[in-house]
């Protein structure tokens, strides 16, 4: 079960297909609380507690939906472009997020800016540059270089980059597989209320090959990530409600969760899932 960070780690740039069949009871399905650098997170954000309740996919309006920490509204593309070229790393990441959502944003609009920002020691610039290397966008695909850049950004206190790094470590992409370190990174940042970290941590509990399986805890982690902004995590919550996996089956809640991802990404698996559930509801 559970669509992994953008149903394929879209924000990280990996291309792992999403599946609908749950391995080991739930299923292991890209970054992230609304993922922002740890040192700029809202102090009101708290890590998920073991609530014992069955929450829904409510998301506070205006919250970053991508998990990248930066969203550039389509209507503001020219403004973001100007800001990016003026050295605003967040604006550059906002443009990259739009590109990952399938919008026609040329990589040339921010590629050289990421290079310059990273060279100047800006962790957000290093994270964005790492994503380009993972995707092979505007430069040769190079997972090893991407890991180096994620390491640099993570050391610079960019929490999202730490999550991206953990995924590379878990999968052994561009670096020797190290699940222990990947888990440590996720636990540290999830404890700080970083949604993307909690989302990825949930998959460790689902998989059960490294941690003791705890599907209820996984559900709470996915829900926390969803409610704090990451719509990719909402797909996982929606699938749990649709299938009744370790939570009471509730098609209304499932459809609402899927719809969030469909509205944000504008297509793909989230929309297909939402339509499937609406059909079951007779809508």
Image (tube, rainbow, N blue to C red):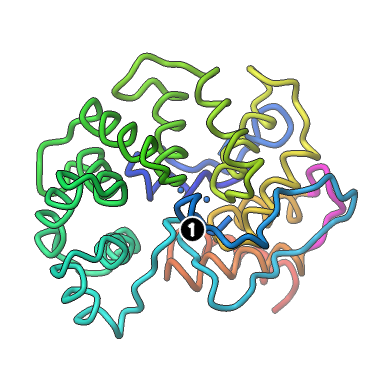
- In this rendering, would 190 be left or right of 261? right
Query: With respect to residue 121, does 185 lie above or below?
Result: above
- In this rendering, would 102 be left or right of 237? left
Judge whether residue 139 can be spotted in this image. yes
**Magenta stretch contains residue 245:** yes
Image spot of residue 251 (x, y percent): 77, 64
Residue at horizontal 47%, vertical 24%?
170
Residue at horizontal 57%, vertical 26%?
183
In this view, which residue lies farthest toward the right? 52
Image spot of residue 93 (x, y percent): 30, 60
Q: Which residue is mark 1?
A: 40
- In this rendering, would 116 be left or right of 254? left
Image spot of residue 135 (x, y percent): 23, 43
Query: With respect to residue 180, does 221 lie above or below?
Result: below
**Magenta stretch contains residue 136:** no
Residue sitting nearer the eye, 79 or 200: 79
Residue at horizontal 88%, vertical 54%?
53
Q: Which residues are magenta?
A: 244-250
Query: With respect to residue 124, does 153 lie above or below?
Result: above
């Amino acid at each position: 079960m559970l669509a992994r960070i953008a149903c394929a780690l879209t924000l990280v740039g990996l291309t792992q297909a999403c599946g609908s069949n749950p391995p080991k009871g739930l299923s292991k399905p890209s970054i992230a609380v609304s993922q922002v650098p740890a040192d700029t997170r809202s102090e009101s954000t708290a890590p998920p507690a073991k609530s014992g309740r069955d929450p829904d996919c409510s998301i506070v309006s205006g919250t970053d939906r991508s998990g990248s920490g930066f969203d550039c509204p389509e209507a503001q593309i020219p403004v973001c472009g100007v800001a990016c070229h003026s050295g605003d790393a967040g604006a550059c990441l906002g443009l990259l997020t739009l590109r990952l959502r399938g919008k026609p944003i040329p990589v040339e609009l921010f590629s050289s800016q990421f290079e310059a920002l990273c060279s100047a020691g800006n962790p957000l610039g290093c994270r964005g540059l790492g994503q380009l290397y993972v995707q092979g966008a505007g430069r040769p695909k190079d997972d090893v270089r991407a890991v180096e850049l994620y390491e640099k950004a993570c050391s610079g206190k960019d929490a999202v980059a730490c999550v991206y790094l953990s995924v590379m470590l878990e999968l052994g992409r561009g670096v020797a597989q190290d699940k222990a370190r990947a888990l440590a990174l996720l636990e540290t940042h999830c404890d700080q209320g970083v949604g993307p970290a909690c989302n990825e941590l949930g998959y460790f509990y689902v998989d059960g090959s490294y941690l003791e399986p705890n599907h209820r805890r996984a559900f709470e982690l996915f829900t926390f990530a969803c409610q704090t902004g990451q719509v990719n995590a909402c797909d996982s919550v929606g699938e749990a409600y649709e299938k009744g996996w370790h939570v009471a089956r509730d098609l209304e809640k499932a459809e609402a969760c899927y719809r969030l991802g469909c509205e944000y990404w504008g297509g793909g698996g989230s929309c297909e899932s939402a339509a499937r559930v609406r059909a079951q509801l007779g809508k």
